[in-house]
Image (cartoon, rainbow, N blue to C red):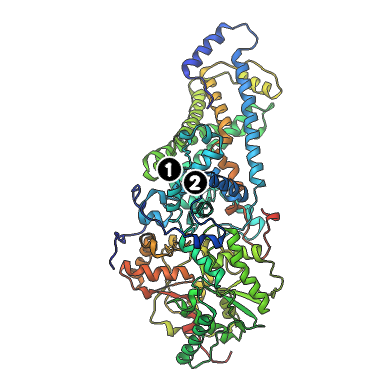
């Protein structure tokens, strides 16, 4: 896993940056820009390759978990319920559902809230959800803490957990926590940050605010982007390719051949 | 009933045990001998370069089945499946939790096929394929009945059955097959059915049944074999020919066909609906077993194919036949191809072609055990869930007293009988008894609440399994009956139609 600056290192970087005052753009700005470009490339290429692999691997037999919809619109509705409401998880375990759903929809809202750093002018609906986006941060932390407690406290879940399962929770909790801390405790210069992000999008390196909490937050995000295609985060694209969920139950009505595998 | 292991105590459902590591590590079925392996195209014994061969085979299967590839990647270890498997609930062995069973393969997948597992194995729980791992595969991929209950509850639809099948196929391809399943598939290739019942014995048995029905009812109900030009080819599990309570189901089918005036026939070439090729994950063997049915249907010139009461056979017939042995353009398009016997009887009831005297079954208070493959891997009728409605409609048409078991143990949440997926063998009795616990708990409840006397099923494996395990729980082995026994007993024969 690529190293990210610990608070101690980050503060040293901060001192370094302060000494460089007067220099147009800090070293850290370049470093983070490079990491962002690298992480974005890894994320897009890595997940893209995975999606290509899934779509090219045949599904030679009909295996929807039944009762299943018999038509394509029915399958779309089933997938919608899975993706939006976590229908199967709800059937399974209400606690895991509650924590998991709170986390994921907190994450979605928080991500959408962050669009304000990438759009100018800010889209009106993004502006509209700004206040709700703060609660999204709480929901994420609530969900993640709940999931982690479950992972530690339930003997069955503890048994199936690898170190990476704990680290993943730590990483995302770190992202949510550092984000909330920036919102409420150690503020950063969001205008400068936005300038930096918009700059990245047009391949210009602007000055990145050097607050340690921001640098930690961004480093953790970069880390998440890089490990996405090589970790269990592949459950996100995987769900859409799961034959037990995305196949229609119509083997008698329509002959399923590997050529029309879908 | 005496046993060399502790029989689980029936407590109130639901009951999720604390994990007991290695509680079932001693359980494994007999390994196939060269004679059982070779006719199926597998090496006779463990090959020398098994490690490389197994990894190659895994790579081949990952490229062949999208399910396997996606399921290996997608699991987040959320734990939703951990309390859903009847073998976990009955044994408390953590490797019988679906996710842990999958992880036996996933850890090897990660080690050989993923960046994280190649470079940081300890971090992501990746492991080399060692003899111990292979041993675990053999043990625990034979403690899964491929019932798909876990796949209902997984947020990504991960179906452990797919992974168990892949595990068994890899094992067989390096020379470690399971004796029970592979020997049976060999019998189908050689003789035509799972029981190795040769044609003369089959004819003799059916003749005996004609006499028996004549004696009971004074009606000439026929059990035709190889009758060219019949409308219906009935393909049924060979256990229906003589095992109890299966045979009463076969008598029921015959009575229904007789009363409805349908010309039908069995086939000596395809005298078996079961297809254990499914259990061992071998699509090639599954196709070869299924092909006999297409051949028989063409040779006999039938217009319809109807499948008898058998869970996994119905899965193969319903979900795979069209792909593997289709198209069925030579059959009557007015009927689904293939059709389940329950669908056929249900349609006849809807048309008013059958009359019942329900009082014939008044000595019974009946419940229904949904079989796993019918419930979660197939359908009946035109509506999703018809596989739950139609068999119950048949029971209610022929019985006055019917009660369902607890909601989370029926329909899509039904528990496997404990003997499915190629585990219905005496070398796995402990596993079968313990795996039946959740069903026994639910059954016990309806016995206490409604004085249920009989449990009907539409699967040959369920029927054999319950006949064996009910006595371990101090219940009568004759509690388990065929749905078409109830139908046949209440059906009014000989009256005008």
Residue under numbered circle 2: B105
Discs 2, 1 touching: Cβ within 8 Å: no
Pinpoint the chain carrying mark 1. A
- Disc 2 element: helix
Which residue occupies the foreground of this view, B322 or B181? B181
Which residue occupies the foreground of this view, A94 or A148? A148
Corner quadrant of residue B273: bottom right
Q: Residue at x 67, y 17 (%)?
A: A205
Question: Does the rendering let one see residue B432?
Answer: no
* Dot in front, 2 or 1: 2
Q: Is residue B367 above or below residue A68?
A: below
Q: Is residue B150 above or below residue B275?
A: above
Residue under numbered circle 1: A160
**Distance CA(mark 2)–CA(mark 1):** 13 Å
Q: Residue at x 47, y 66 (%)?
A: B370
Which residue occupies the foreground of this view, B133 or A27? B133
Pinpoint the chain carrying mark 2. B
In the displayed structure, does residue A81 sit left or right of residue B439? right
Corner quadrant of residue A166: top left
Q: Is residue B451 above or below residue A80?
A: below
Q: Residue at x 47, y 39 (%)?
A: B127
- Disc 1 element: loop
Check residue A8 in the rendering and tell me which mark sits there, or answer none. Answer: none
């Amino acid at each position: 896993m690529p190293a990210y600056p610990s608070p101690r290192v980050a503060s040293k970087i901060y001192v370094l940056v302060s000494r460089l005052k007067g220099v147009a753009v800090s070293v850290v700005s370049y470093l983070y820009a490079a990491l962002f470009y690298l992480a974005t490339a890894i994320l897009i290429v890595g997940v893209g390759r995975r999606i290509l692999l899934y779509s090219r691997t045949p599904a030679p037999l009909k295996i929807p978990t039944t009762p299943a919809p018999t038509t394509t619109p029915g399958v779309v509705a089933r997938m919608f319920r899975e993706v939006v409401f976590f229908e199967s998880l709800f059937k399974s375990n209400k606690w895991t559902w509650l924590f998991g759903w709170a986390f994921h929809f907190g994450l979605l809202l928080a991500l959408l809230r962050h669009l304000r750093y990438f759009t100018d002018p800010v889209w009106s609906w993004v502006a509209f959800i700004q206040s709700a986006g703060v609660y999204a941060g709480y929901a994420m932390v609530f969900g993640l803490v709940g999931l982690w407690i479950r992972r530690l406290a339930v003997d069955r879940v503890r048994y199936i957990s690898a170190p990476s399962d704990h680290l993943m929770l730590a990483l995302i909790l770190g992202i949510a926590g550092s984000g909330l801390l920036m919102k409420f405790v150690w503020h950063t210069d969001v205008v400068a940050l936005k300038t930096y992000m918009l700059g990245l999008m047009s391949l210009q390196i602007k000055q990145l605010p050097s607050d340690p909490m921001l640098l930690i937050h961004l480093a953790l995000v970069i880390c998440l982007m890089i490990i996405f295609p090589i970790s269990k985060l592949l459950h996100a694209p995987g769900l859409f390719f799961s034959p037990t969920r995305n196949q229609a139950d119509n083997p008698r009505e329509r002959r399923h051949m590997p050529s029309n595998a879908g | 009933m005496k046993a060399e292991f502790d029989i689980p105590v029936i407590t109130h459902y639901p009951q999720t045990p604390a994990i007991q590591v290695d509680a079932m590590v001693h359980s494994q079925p007999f390994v196939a001998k060269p004679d059982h392996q070779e006719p199926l195209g597998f090496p006779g014994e463990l090959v020398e370069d098994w490690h490389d061969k197994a990894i190659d085979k895994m790579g081949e299967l990952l490229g062949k089945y999208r399910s396997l590839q996606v399921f290996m990647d997608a699991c987040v270890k959320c734990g939703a499946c951990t309390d859903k498997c009847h073998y976990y609930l009955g044994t408390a062995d953590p490797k019988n939790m679906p996710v842990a069973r999958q992880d036996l393969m996933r850890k090897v997948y990660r080690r050989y096929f993923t960046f994280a597992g190649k470079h940081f194995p300890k971090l992501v729980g990746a492991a080399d394929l060692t003899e111990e791992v292979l041993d675990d595969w053999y043990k625990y991929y034979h403690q899964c009945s491929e019932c798909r209950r876990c796949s209902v509850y997984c947020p990504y639809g991960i179906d452990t059955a797919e992974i168990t099948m892949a595990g068994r196929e890899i094992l067989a391809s390096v020379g470690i097959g399971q004796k029970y399943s592979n020997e049976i598939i060999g019998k189908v290739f050689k003789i035509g059915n799972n029981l190795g019942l040769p044609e003369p014995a089959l004819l003799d048995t059916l003749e005996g049944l004609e006499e028996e029905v004549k004696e009971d009812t004074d009606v000439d109900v026929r059990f035709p074999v190889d009758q060219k030009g019949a409308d219906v080819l009935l393909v049924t599990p060979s256990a229906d020919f003589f095992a109890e309570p299966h045979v009463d189901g076969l008598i029921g089918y015959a009575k229904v066909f007789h009363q409805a005036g349908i010309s039908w026939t069995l086939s000596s070439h395809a005298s078996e609906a079961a297809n254990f090729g499914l259990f061992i994950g071998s699509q090639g063997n599954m196709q070869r077993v299924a092909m006999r049915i297409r051949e028989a249907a063409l040779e006999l010139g039938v217009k319809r194919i109807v499948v008898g009461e058998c869970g996994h056979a119905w899965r193969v017939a319903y979900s795979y036949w069209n792909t593997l042995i289709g198209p069925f353009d030579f059959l009557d398009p007015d009927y689904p191809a293939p059709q389940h016997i329950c669908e056929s009887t249900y349609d006849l009831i809807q048309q008013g072609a059958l009359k019942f005297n329900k009082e014939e079954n008044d000595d019974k208070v009946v419940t229904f055990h949904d079989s796993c493959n019918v419930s979660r891997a197939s359908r009946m009728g035109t509506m999703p869930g018809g596989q739950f409605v139609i068999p119950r409609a048949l029971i209610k048409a022929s019985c006055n007293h019917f009660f369902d078991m607890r909601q989370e143990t029926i329909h899509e949440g039904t528990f496997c009988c404990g003997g499915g997926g190629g585990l219905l063998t005496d070398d796995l009795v402990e596993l079968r008894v313990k795996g039946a616990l959740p069903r026994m708990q639910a059954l016990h409840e309806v016995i206490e609440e409604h004085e249920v006397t009989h449990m009907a099923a539409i699967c040959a494996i369920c029927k054999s399994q319950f006949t064996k395990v009910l006595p371990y729980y101090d219940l009568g082995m004759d509690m388990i009956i065929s749905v078409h026994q109830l139908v046949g007993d209440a059906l009014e024969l000989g009256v005008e139609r």
